[in-house]
Structures are given as structure tokens and as C-alpha cells.
Image (cartoon, rainbow, N blue to C red):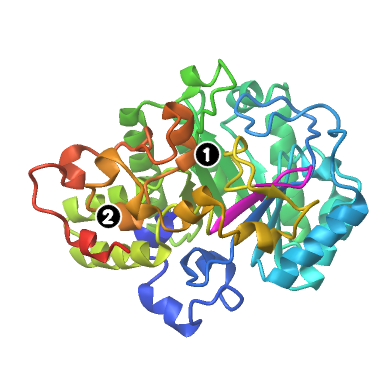
């Protein structure tokens, strides 16, 4: 997760972290990515059921719940064990989590036991009563998917009217005082809508947006034609950065983030240098070092509807264990799991252009699930990295100063 508003626009300074000691339990939500203890954020795909059929669905959601979903007793025990372990955030996802009959009681339990609870939803089932109840029980944030404007969103989501439904949900959340933001997966179908999306944020007073880079897991033949090229990705990040800066210059201060392509961090750093903003670039690099790059297998974990644990929500072909057999913390710290141990100390394992990259320790090699799906090798370079060989100082170039910081 790369904070465009934090790195590029300076909404967070490195000194801000010193006030909190960088411990996850003490950090406010917008600084959690800089924690030093790195208890993982949990993405809990609590149900496979969904009311939409999205082109880019990584969970292969179905119309109804999967037959092997956790029972209420098992789900309750899971939340209790996660909070006992000290995870800072549980993200309730799906499928569509609002179809789950026990969502609110499980959210309430997580909050009561000290975790931040957040919700990822398409918004169509977020009634005013439901939003009000979620606010009352302490839900920290609801992220509503808006994958483009109007027909672009409807096409990706597989239903006419999905855009208007999502927009209504955003307004409902704001009306009841529930913190809300947008989630958008970048595709060819919506890249032209980015300016309009920022305009919508201004008009609606939406304080946060996360732009997700598309992850093609190889199971959907429609995804390759939706994927942005490397050049289109650079252009999209440029536009996001520029619109974020323009909003800041007008007195607005939204939180703008990109997700699932760690190349965005070094790219923004280089962009600041090209623009002559050296002091801002130095501070951005300090924040990138504190962030530590890709977090699959150490800073983030995913748990499926059936209790299986994965390194992240995209890498479902890798099952680390099941909470039906062992507690999450025992799975997460299993010394015999070679892949998991590698992900926690991946710099020595990464191959190809990653190994010679001067930004290795602030990028971490990108998304391992994407590299694995493209090559069959979990340590191969991420094919979505759009930095040039010159930018990452490969081959005959003088090694960058960041190489000395490898562990």
C-alpha cells in the first residue's frame, strides 16, 4: 500500500511516527503501514456469496455461500484468537460481506476485543439502518467499490445500476457519520474516468480512495484485455499524483493510496526528484524505508470462508494451514513452512532484476502472487513493475545506496 498523499504531497512527515513509537496498537489508522511490529492486517473473506459478478473478482465469488463456510461458533473463535494475538485490523470482505447473516455481531466482537474493523463492500446492500448499526458498534471504515463512472462501473460489476447503487451507499454512509472511501481497480475500462472520479470525490466530500492495480490470477480470460500496459500504468499513477496534489492545493486533504504494485513508491520518489523537490523526495524515501515494501506473508494475511490461511488475498493457490486445525498465530509462525519463512526475509530469495534493484528494500519485490502466476516461481520479478532498468540502476550502473540496507 503506497500513500500518494503521504509520499508525494507530504500529508505525513517521518517525524509524525515518532509520537506513537511505531507500535501497531498505538498508531492511528492512516499510519498503520509504518508499524515496526508488523502484526498482520487480516483480510477475512468471510463468505463466498455475492450479489454481483465482477470481472476482476479474485475470490471467484458465487451467488450463494460456499458449503464449507465457517459456522458462527468457528467464526467467533477466529475473531477471538486473532484479537488475542493482537492483529491491528480485521477487514471483513467476501464475496459480499453484507450477505453474511452474522456480520454485525462479528464486527462488534472484533471492536470490543480491541481490533479495528473495516468493511469492503459493493455497497448495494448498505441500507441506512445497516450503516447506522455499523457506526454504532464501532466499525472504523467502509470501503465501497466504484470501478469507474456510470456504465464503466456497471460493465465491470456485471449489473446495470450498480454505479447508482454504490453512489447511494456512499451518501448513506456519510449521512449517518460512518467514515467511507472509494476502492477502484485500475483497468482499461475505467482509466479514462480517473479525472471524473476525483471530481466526484470533491463533489461528494469523500475523504479517501484506494486505487488497486489489477491482479490477473490466470483464471479469467477477460482479465488480460482489461490490464493496463506498463506505459498506461505510469500514466495512471502520474494522473493520480497530479490530481492528489491539486486537491491539496485547494485546501482539501483526502487520503489517496495505491495498492498491489510496490513500484509506485520508488516511482513517486523519482518523480519528486525530477520535479526538483529534493527535500520532499528525501522525506518520501524515509517513509518508504519505514514501510518496508511488499507485505504478503508478514504484514498482511488472508483467511478464506472455510478457514484456510493464505499469504495475501490473491495467493489462494498457497494454503498455509487451516484455523480449523491450528490457531492462526501457530500457522503464521510455523518454522517449517519454507515459503512463509522466505516471505518474511525475501531479499535473499528474489531473482532477476529485483536482485540488482537499488529500491529492493523499499519495494520488497512487488506482489509475489502475481510473479508466481506469471512464471511458476515465487521469487521471480513481478511482471507489473514498470520501472526501467535505468531507473532501478541495473547491470553496469553504480549500485544504489539502498543496497547496503538489505537484511
The percent position of residue 242, horizontal first and vertical second, equals 35, 47
Residue with the mark numbered 2: 269
Residue at point 38% right, 79% down? 15
Q: Is residue 67 left or right of residue 10?
A: right
Q: Secondary structure at mark 2?
A: helix
Q: In the image shown, does 389 or 103 lie closer to the viewer?
A: 389
Tell me the crowding category of disc 1: few under 14, some 14 to 19, or many 20 or more residues within 10 angstroms, Cα based: some
Q: Is residue 50 left or right of residue 202?
A: right
Does residue 232 lie above or below 116 as drawn? above
Mark 2 or mark 1: which comes first in sequence?
Answer: 1
Q: Is residue 9 visible?
A: no
The percent position of residue 224, horizontal first and vertical second, equals 48, 20
Please state, as top left, top right, bottom left or bottom right, where the C terminus lies in the image: bottom left
Q: Which mark is residue 197?
A: 1
Q: Secondary structure at mark 1?
A: helix
Q: In the image shown, does 400 or 319 lie closer to the viewer?
A: 319
The percent position of residue 72, horizontal first and vertical second, equals 91, 52
Q: Which mark is residue 255?
A: none
Q: Residue furthest front?
A: 336
Q: In the image shown, does 234 or 223 lie closer to the viewer?
A: 223
Residue at point 52% right, 72% down? 37
Magenta stretch: includes residue 198: no
The percent position of residue 175, horizontal first and vertical second, equals 76, 55
Q: In the image shown, does 251 or 392 lie closer to the viewer?
A: 392
Tell me the crowding category of disc 2: few under 14, some 14 to 19, or many 20 or more residues within 10 angstroms, Cα based: many
Residue at point 19% right, 63% down? 278
Q: Is residue 58 visible?
A: yes
Does residue 370 lie above or below 11 as drawn? above
For marks 2 and 1, give the CA distance: 24 Å
Q: Give the residues in magenta.
A: 299-309
Q: Is residue 379 left or right of residue 88?
A: left
Amino acid at each position: 500500500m503506497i500513500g500518494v498523499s503521504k509520499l508525494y504531497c507530504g500529508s505525513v512527515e517521518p517525524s509524525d511516527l515518532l509520537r506513537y513509537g511505531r507500535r501497531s496498537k498505538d498508531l492511528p489508522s492512516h499510519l498503520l503501514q509504518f508499524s515496526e511490529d508488523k502484526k498482520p492486517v487480516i483480510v477475512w473473506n468471510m463468505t463466498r456469496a455475492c450479489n454481483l459478478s465482477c470481472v476482476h473478482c479474485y475470490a471467484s465469488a458465487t451467488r450463494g455461500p460456499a458449503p464449507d463456510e465457517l459456522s458462527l461458533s468457528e467464526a467467533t473463535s477466529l475473531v477471538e484468537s486473532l484479537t488475542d494475538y493482537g492483529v491491528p485490523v480485521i477487514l471483513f470482505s467476501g464475496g459480499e460481506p453484507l450477505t453474511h447473516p452474522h456480520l454485525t455481531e462479528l464486527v462488534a466482537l472484533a471492536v470490543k476485543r480491541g481490533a479495528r474493523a473495516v468493511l469492503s463492500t459493493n455497497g448495494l446492500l448498505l441500507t441506512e439502518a445497516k450503516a447506522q448499526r455499523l457506526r454504532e458498534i464501532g466499525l472504523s471504515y467502509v470501503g465501497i467499490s466504484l470501478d469507474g463512472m456510470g456504465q464503466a462501473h456497471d460493465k465491470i460489476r456485471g449489473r446495470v445500476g450498480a454505479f447508482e447503487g454504490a453512489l447511494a451507499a456512499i451518501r448513506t454512509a456519510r449521512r449517518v457519520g460512518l467514515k467511507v472511501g472509494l476502492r477502484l481497480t485500475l483497468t482499461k475500462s475505467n482509466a479514462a474516468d480517473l479525472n471524473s472520479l476525483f471530481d466526484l470525490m470533491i463533489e461528494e466530500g469523500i475523504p479517501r480512495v484506494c486505487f488497486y492495480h489489477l491482479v490477473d490470477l490466470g483464471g479469467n480470460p477477460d482479465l488480460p484485455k482489461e490490464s493496463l500496459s506498463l506505459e498506461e500504468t505510469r500514466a495512471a499513477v502520474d494522473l493520480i499524483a497530479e490530481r492528489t496534489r491539486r486537491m491539496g492545493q485547494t485546501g482539501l486533504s483526502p487520503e489517496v493510496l495505491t495498492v498491489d504494485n510496490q513500484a509506485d513508491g520508488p516511482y513517486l520518489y523519482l518523480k519528486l526528484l525530477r520535479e526538483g523537490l529534493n527535500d520532499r523526495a528525501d522525506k518520501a524515501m524515509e517513509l518508504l524505508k519505514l514501510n518496508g515494501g511488499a507485505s504478503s506473508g508478514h504484514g498482511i494475511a488472508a483467511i478464506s470462508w472455510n478457514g484456510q490461511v493464505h499469504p495475501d488475498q490473491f495467493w489462494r493457490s498457497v494454503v498455509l494451514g487451516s484455523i480449523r486445525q491450528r490457531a492462526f498465530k501457530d500457522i503464521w509462525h510455523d518454522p517449517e513452512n519454507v515459503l512463509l519463512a522466505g516471505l518474511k526475509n525475501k531479499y535473499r530469495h528474489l531473482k532477476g532484476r529485483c536482485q540488482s534493484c537499488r529500491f529492493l528494500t523499499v519495494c520488497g519485490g512487488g506482489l509475489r502472487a502475481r510473479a508466481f502466476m506469471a512464471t511458476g516461481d515465487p521469487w521471480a520479478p513481478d511482471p507489473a513493475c514498470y520501472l526501467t532498468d535505468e531507473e532501478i540502476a541495473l547491470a553496469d550502473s553504480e549500485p544504489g545506496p539502498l543496497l547496503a540496507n538489505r537484511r
